[in-house]
Amino acid sequence: MSRLPEATNLVWQTAGVTPEARVQLLRQRPVTLWMTGLSGAGKSTLAFALEKRLIELGHACFVLDGDNVRHGLNADLGFSPEARAENIRRIAEVAKLMNAAGLIVITSFISPYCEDRRTARTLIGPGGFREIHISTTLKNCEQRDPKGLYEKARAGLISEFTGISAPYEAPEEPSLSLDTFELQVEECLERLLGVLQPFLVIPEQSR
């Protein structure tokens, strides 16, 4: 994948608002929940349900969803390994900016390669990055096939489709693993909120 020439003569501008000031304003600490899993695993369903729950609890958050992002920011990218890597790099940079603004970010991306997810963790920072494996099996995802994509992939109508003609590398040590074929949405939300709890409760001395 060809890249445009990189810009030069750039100087980082320091903001006058500190991260702690944003913590005080929003009463939360920023974090990115990185949901990874096969197509049809339930990532988007959980991401948007968690966003709704967090908003109801008074927390500022936003979902970065794979399909939605490819309608705009990443509309120029395909699904080759190189394009997938660039897709994840861009998303990680966006999540990092949103975290810098004090937001809780929930991402919903297949992000099939361990190396790309390691890149995202490094960009965002390990202290504010939690990898969530939506571990629903290929068999169950294909049984659901909510978008009809597996059927098309099996028929050879979609190339480089994760799980069929392209690999998926499962996380080795995720912060949480959820199989949405075995767990109901509410059960998943409670476990996700458990991962988020340290970022939602601000110590008394910080108030």
Image (tube, grey):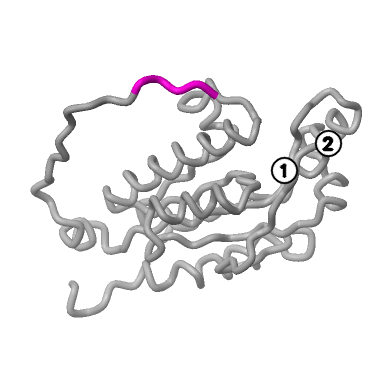
User: Residue 93 lies in what quarter of the image?
Assistant: top left
> Does the stretch in magenta take in 2?
yes
Give the numbered dot on residue 105: none
**Amino acid identity at mark 2:** Tyr
Q: Is residue 201 above or below residue 4?
A: below
User: Residue 83 lies in what quarter of the image?
Assistant: top right
> Magenta region's main secondary structure?
loop
User: Which residue occupies 59% across, 44% down?
Assistant: 109
User: Badge 1 local density, few (<14 within 10 Å), some, or many (20+)?
Assistant: many
User: Which residue occupies 84% across, 52% down?
Assistant: 140
Q: Position of residue 5 (x, y in %)?
A: 35, 21
Q: Quadrant of the C terminus?
A: bottom left
User: Which residue occupies 81% across, 37% down?
Assistant: 165
Q: Which residues are magenta?
A: 1-5
Give the numbered dot on residue 39: 1
Check contact, mark 1 vs mark 2: CB within 8 A. yes
**Amino acid identity at mark 1:** Ser
